[in-house]
Image: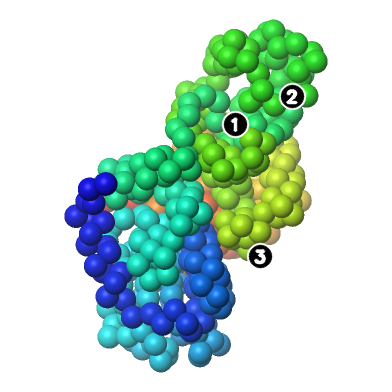
Amino acid sequence: MVKSSKSIDLRTLCRGIDLDIKRPVLIMSSPQIDAISATGLLCRVIYKNQGIFHVTFFDVIYNSEQLNSTIEKYPDYQPITVGLELDSSIQNISSQDRVIFIGKSNVEHKNVQHIDSGVCVPAAVYVFAREKFGVGKDELKIALMGILSSTQTNEDNLIHELVAEGTQKGLIRETRGLRLFGSNFLPLVDVFQYSFRPFMRGLSGNRSGVEKLIEMAEIPFSMRESTISVLNTEQKQHLTANLIPQLDPWSLKQVLGQDFEFLSEGEKSPLRYMSNIRSLLETLWMRQEMGIALGIIIGDKAQLLRKSVDTYLLHAKEVIYGVQRVLESGFTEHRGEDSPISMVSLSIQNKEVLPDIARILIENGIAERQYVMLISGNSVAISWKQGVGSISEALKHFRNVGLTPVATSSTSIRFDNVNAEMVATIRERTAEYAKCIQSSV
């Protein structure tokens, strides 16, 4: 295979990085799903080479104080950051080793080594691991999980090379069809009833609506506890034909389209399809369960996969319940109000589901503005329309004005332990952020 110039440049860059593979490694990772995959890949190659590592998670951005305090706790470890961005310039680095920054970085310091060639983080880590440790099919598979989940992959030659290599080696296969979580391992009814990525009005949380869909598709009653993947071609076509008229444009785009199959996974494994993997990792990030996500990627799968699927289904039920509560409340926009933010109040027990509820209100057109601010008890979630700003820009904006939200997805943040005065401040600062983003377009 002919190597692209970017691939060659990245290889040269990685070869020049100073790393003693016999010493323990401190990995500081972002919670974003492409960074989680990259971190898992790095952990795996270190372990395979009988090395020692420790992983700690920051939010998407971090400051020099966090960096130095973490490095000081592990003085004998070589520090590497994966997918993180710094929110201020570094004046001093307390590490005796040169810190390796993998991914986008604005750090300029004599004690820093960069691996930032403009490619997505999993691809950069894969090339780094290949040059420093050696890699096999398992490592390429993990890299592809991260690459195919990344939004930074479309036109990069190195990405195309790695996807082609994975296809050639029988690791992945491109597929098309229904991209619904659990289509290969959950009962047919459950796939639709617990769908919240996307939320399908009339089907999500509505068992009778799902049963009507299955009846219209002429799926035999005896197969309703079967998975979608075991339906024959004609049955799948009938199911799809009856599903399409019930979907809004956004949901249709999410449900039907390109997917990738990981052929070394069992046919009923939650990791068989890229759409499943992405949904699982996004949900674990939303619930701040990065350790479970990392364990799945590294390969400690059996028990953790069962736990992650249970977590996903619980999260799905709670999110769908919350959306239904908003719909039942008769939520309407205040059209005369000149604001980019839709304000929603909801009394719900689990704060972890708030950003997903807000996301669904935007995606399904329930809220017509680009930002939804969802208030429940002493927690506030803000979600915004995909393509509007970035998670790192949002975090920097709020931290610069003294607020400390936690990132819960690439398009949402959550504030905890807030009072009425803080709610007003958050709304004001969100409006400021929206204006900044609008003016920069």
Q: First in sequence, mark 1 or 2: give its number.
A: 1
Q: Quadrant of residue 313?
A: top right
Q: Is residue 315 left or right of residue 92?
A: right
Q: First in sequence, mark 3 or 1: give its number.
A: 1
**Foreground disc of the pair 1, 2:** 2
Relative height, residue 79 to residue 412 (above, below): below
The one of 39 and 322 positioned closer to us in this rendering: 39
The one of 367 and 78 positioned closer to us in this rendering: 78
Q: Residues within 10 Å of mark 3 (few under 14, many from 20)?
A: few
Read off the residue under disc 3. 417
Residue type, mark 3 in image: Asn
Q: Residue at x 74, y 54 (%)?
A: 303
Distance from label 3 to label 1 (Cα)?
35 Å
Read off the residue under disc 1. 180
The one of 17 and 279 positioned closer to us in this rendering: 17
Residue type, mark 1 in image: Leu
Q: Residue at x 55, y 87 (%)?
A: 73
Q: Is residue 3 left or right of residue 193?
A: left
Q: Residues within 10 Å of mark 1 (few under 14, many from 20)?
A: many
**Element type where label 3 sits in the image:** loop
Q: Residue at x 44, y 61 (%)?
A: 135
Relative height, residue 316 to residue 180 (above, below): below
Return the mark for residue 226.
2
Residue 284 screen position, x and y as percent = 62, 53
Relative height, residue 324 to residue 278 (above, below): above
Q: Residues within 10 Å of mark 2 (few under 14, many from 20)?
A: some
**Element type where label 1 sits in the image:** loop
